Image (cartoon, coloured by chain):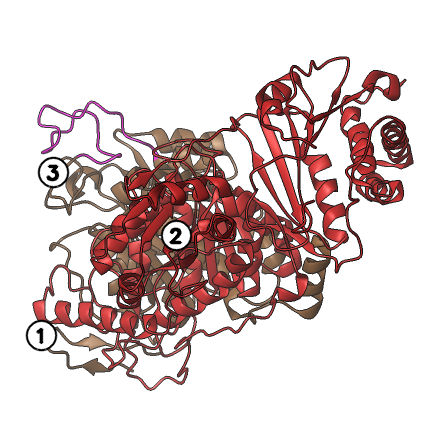
Chain colours: A brown, B red
Amino acid sequence: MTTVLERDGLRGAVLERSPEAAKDYKGKVAPDWCPGCGDFGVLNALQRAVFELGKQPHELLVVSGIGCSSNLPGYINAYGMHTLHGRSLPVATGAKMANHELTVIATGGDGDGYGIGGNHLTHIARRNVDLTYLVMNNQIYGLTTGQISPTSRLDMKTKSTPHGNLEEPINPITSSIMNGATYVARGYSADIKHLTQLIKGGIEHEGFSLIDVFSPCVTFNHDNDFAFFKPRIKKLEDEDHDPGDWKAACEKALAWGDEIWTGLFFESDRPSIDSMEPVLEGPGLARRPLGLSDSQSKGLIEAMM
Amino acid sequence: MSSKGLDLTIAIGGAAGQGIATPGNILARILARRGLHLYAYNAYQSIIRGGHILLMVRTRDQEVLSHGDKIDLLLCLNQDTMDRHLSFLKAGARVLYDGKKVQPGEAPDGVVLCPMPVAELAGESKNKLIQNTISLGMMMSLLGVDFSVLEEALSQLFVRKGPAVVDENVSMARAGFEHAEANFEPFPTPLPDGGKPLAVWTGNSALAMGGAAAGVKFYAAYPMSPSTGVLHWMAANARKLGILVRQVEDEIGVANMVIGAAHTGARAMCATSGGGFALMTEAIGAASMMEIPVVYINVMRAGPSTGVPTKTEQGDLWQALGASQGDFERFIVAPKDTLDAFNTMAEVFNYTDRAQCPGIVISDLLISEGTYTVDPDLIDMKPAIDRGSLLADPSPNGNYLRYAYTDSGISPRVPPGYEGFVHTVATDEHDEDGVIISDEFTHPHKRRKMVEKRARKFEGIAADVPPPELEGPAGAEVTLVGWGSTYGVIREAIEMLADHGVVANQLPIKWIVPFHGDEVSKILTAAKKVIIVENSHSGQFARYMRSETGFAAAGHIRKYDGEPFMPHHVVEGILELVKGDSEIYVPYQEMIV
């Protein structure tokens, strides 16, 4: 059921409803992304994935940072947090730790996640928090009108690099595997069906899932646009790739030429921190009563005597 | 041990790595179990081995308000300690040292030198720290304490290391005790016994325990002196108390992680010091914008920058006031002592829950790392918990607006996970429904209404925060104003001033935001002479108070050398300032530690 609210000065906003189709995961407002932006495909795939998994809107918490793609929580029918630039992962970690009953999804861009938030990505991977991180990687800073990002190619000319980029781009796939992420995948926003499967796999995976998505910026990145990717994109699923083989995964992830690989590069069953932490046995911390019991209080006082 | 009752300070000096903490802890336990009050101040340096440490354990038969002005019993574990401190001792003081290794130099008249034949007493022992145990035995004799008391304390301390270690320590302590009995005159009055046993804690453990009692379920931190004790307490007690504790990659991560936890409805907190707090500031504004209650503790050390990591200062007041961009709502509170630190945690959690905004607790090295006794019956482990409008109306009516405009400004809060309340919170400005109005839907009228809603909400709750009250005689010649940790030393200085014929009172400030400008103004304009006492060079508090009240104090006592005020510093400052020739007095720190 869909309810449309009249809102002064705004488009009709939509209240939470029981989803009967992926479109029922549409948010209260329509995305303000540029027409043709890759992020539409990612939003679409995420909505399909949570629908196909039967997740109810109130069970989901979508946490983003800042940037074009980080506006996503406002566009999906789920609980959302639109946090600070680069900080979606620690906020999402805190939320998951304090209520592990929630399905937590972090979203953002390459600048947000691999640049300003890079330190958090390193450590959430080794910490193996059970959440899914969806990075809309357009290899450019879009909302600030076009400067290099950590994934911009060498020699790329932008407003901040008029003579060409001198810095080697980061490879989020290999670095996340090295840092201990237990589900590492790459998608392409033009292949929504494939991306939906990758996101579903990430949500179902118990541990930290990084899904890097080529999500072209049609306004500011004319080097890595849909025309660039279309002939190059290949799927690991069509190959004989073993996601348990981290070396093969890294080799495939580093390929950047006529063939650029997408799909599930690496997966391991290393236990998530949520499952290792005895304090989290039982209901979410946020749902437990506050304060100390008599015996806890007595023990604390006795330890001081 | 004057006519005013017991007032004795035992100091242990040496280098880091010489095992000063253990005899310090044993002394504290022995004193507290006899019902004696104590405060132990550990002057140390940022070094793991070497340097100079001086642990001062002051004990009284009443509340200990500061580390005092004197040393009665000095244990020198090395020559450096003797060289630094002997000349400051007064007649009647005793000095313990290894007679073979440490040269006493010239002792002031009446100071009793008590050389210990450490090698002779230690015999076959290969324990490098055995000197400490022998010294403890000697101290018991000088203090007139039965050896059995120390024997029991040592047995408890070393029980886990096995009977051989217990036996060695007890026999060494006994050798020291017997040597002192035979050779040195004890203090004229033995240490009193039989009082109600007291508990021993540090300010950091009081802050942590206060959080636990207030219902904290999530604690995150990056280690930083002098706040690390909060992390250690939380980590040690986490599993027993059902608190999730995480050490995080940096303070930015910490500050944001607690926001995520708090948003789900758990009470969450973190602690750091100035440098880490600097990294947290953007998140504090984010919590305020998203209207998420969360508590940040800044345990101040001497700044700026890396500063002096193991020394105290009150130099982060303006940092706390300016901690994040824009106009935003937050509480700032500075507890005055350890028990107040404990109680403050529940208070600030209740206020922040009610006002749905962050709270900043300012402590400092002096409170946080000091070891204090406390009457266990005064520790309220079940403080009142008020979560404000959290889940006030959990039945969905299809019209939930997270940031609903209300008369009070308080919008009922429902955390993620509840059906029928789905919404997004945002650090961008947003409308009642959480939809951002920072880009496509920019709207000046909505922006204004939302700014006013948040402000109204805060003002309503802030009105419940109690104003400061004048302590001491009305109509006093001098009114002393301090904030946070200076409370105790000012109180002691006021008692001492009576001997100089100066009647003084104190206006201690605990709540920085909200600051009760009208009440403070009223009290201070009626005062005869106002002197502000603070541990900062620029008078951060004096300037803040002036900005909030328009009131300029007549005198200022400021200390910024890293060491806390001793009572005589404040007394001498007041005696100087009441002459009216100067406005600022900066005490000289005699003891070099």
- Give the amino acid at mark 3: His
Q: Characterize the magenta stretch by its predominant secondary structure.
A: loop
Left or right of A5: which side holds B1? right
Label 3: few (<14), some or many (≥20) within 10 Å?
some
Residue B78 is at least partly visible in this image: yes
SS of the residue at dot 1? Answer: loop
Residue A165 counted in the magenta span: yes
Q: Which mark is residue B390?
A: none
Answer with mark 3 or mark 1, whichever residue precedes in sequence. 1
Q: Quadrant of the C terminus of chain A?
A: bottom right
Report the mark closest to the observer, 3 or 2.
Answer: 2
Q: Is residue A200 shown to the viewer in this render?
A: no
The residue beneath circle 3 is A222
Circles 3 and 1 in contact, beta carbons < 8 Å = no
Q: In which quarter of the image is the N terminus of chain A?
A: bottom left
Over which residues does the magenta segment extend? Answer: A148-171
Task: State the SS at label 2.
Answer: strand
The amino acid pointed to by label 1 is Gly
Instruction: Name which quarter of the figure residue B56 lies in.
Output: top right
Which residue in the protein does label 1 denote?
A9
Give the number of the disc on residue B482: 2
Q: Are marks 2 and 1 in contact (CB under 8 Å)?
A: no
Q: Do the residues labelled 3 and 2 touch (CB within 8 Å)?
A: no
Q: Is residue A167 above or below residue B404?
A: above
Using the image, determine if residue A28 lies above or below residue B22: below
Report the residue at 39% width, 38% height from top.
Answer: B559
